[in-house]
Amino acid sequence: MMAAKGQASEVFGDKNHAYPDHAVMYDEALLKAIIENAIDGIIVIDSKGAILSANPSCCALFGYSADEMCGQHVDILIPSADRSDHNNYINRYEITGESNIIGIGREVTALKKSGETFPAGLAVSEVLEGGKRIYVGIIHDLTAENLAVEQLKDHNIKLEKEVAERTESLEQIVQKLEQAKDEVSRSLLKEQEINQMKTRFVSMASHEFRTPLSSIQLSASLIEHYYDRIDKLKIFGHLAKIKSAVGSLTDILNDFLSVERIESGKVVPSAGEFDIKALCDDIIEGIKLQAKPKQRINYIHKGNVKVVADNAMLQHCIINLLSNAVKYSGEDGVVTLITDKTPQNLSIKVTDNGIGIPTDEQPHLFEPFFRASNVSDVSGTGLGLNIVKRYTELMNGTMEVKSMPKKGTAFLLEFPI
């Protein structure tokens, strides 16, 4: 410890207690050894800011010798931007006793002889000596600590980035797994649907193909074995049955062909202008031939009769809905067709008071080969409504159904204009 003007013993001694000379000398030597070997810088200044003493660590820290520092103003250790604040702290404390730095540890920017600055931890305490205030400052170089903090921050940032990247990677993996799971689920569901369709197809084919083929075989056998013993009228009757059975098979095959062409994307709507009322009148005349003797078919048209749409697709939809309405209605059933052309859309509604569709089966109504459990022995492929729905969607239309068992069914098709 270097002391200016022989004040070291006065600064660090205690005159309030009397010790033997050898004890005082021992205490001073011990205190001096402690101060001179302290790893932190220790500096003593008077109330004017003049440096009274500095330990070796303080001199090494700032790059000055003890002789260079002692007697200098403490400003030489403070960057110019901070000097006025430091002097104000000391002056304010001298005048008011209000402490801003005394007894308070804080981080400051210190200035070396070389002009280099560094972060330092500063703790200042006050010592009264002979009625005068002197100040002892302990200075700790924070460069290594701050560097470690910055490195730790950088490391944390890198870790957070790595965690974020890995989290994102894991989220992507989870997302891909979820997608794969969904694809597998869809594949399984599709396979189940295909298996169900196969089962329905086999069931439908065994029934729908067997009946007309049996009729054809029977009529052909009767003609073959008894053609010389039956009159021409009966032969013509059997031929008519054969033609009817062939027509039924043709209709079934046409339904299969329609589904295949839709699936392969070969069906494209071709719009043209036509008279919707005239089209429906012609359709109803054909449907009446299928109707039971007491059944009634009513037709109502509203609005303009001219529409622009795919004539063939629209005709197929109306024929299928009316044909189903007739098939699944009783002997005294009433079937109603309503067409309504407004500037915004064309709507087609077919209602009947027939057997209706079981409520729990309605979600499956438009699936290929689906037939409701209450259709009994009424013939059908289970493809008609599926084709109608697909044709409707190809024409940018919508299809709705409302049905109550034993009370009837209503289908509504709407097409934007």
Image: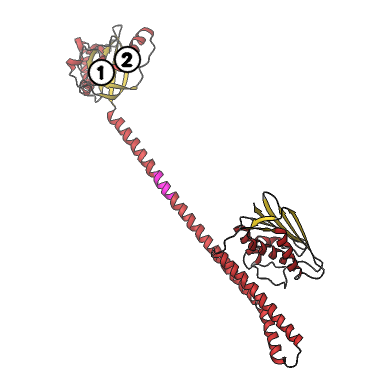
Q: How crowded is mark 2: few (under 14 residues within 10 Å), some or many (20 or more)?
A: some
In this view, 128 is above or below 315: above
In this view, 65 is above or below 362: above
Q: Under tag 2, what secondary structure?
A: helix
Along the line of sight, the residue nearer the viewer: 98 or 79: 79
Along the line of sight, the residue nearer the viewer: 176 or 272: 272
Which residue in the structure is indicated by mark 1? 77
Residue 90: x and y in percent read: 33, 12
- What segment carries the magenta color? 163-170
Would residue 396 be found to the left or right of residue 46 on screen? right
Q: Under tag 1, what secondary structure?
A: helix
Residue 200: x and y in percent read: 62, 71
Callout 2 amino acid: His
Callout 1 amino acid: Leu
Question: Could one spot residue 292 in this view of the protein?
Answer: yes
Would residue 168 be found to the left or right of residue 268 on screen? left
* Quadrant of res 217: bottom right
* Outermost bottom residue: 228
User: Image quadrant for the N terminus?
Assistant: top left
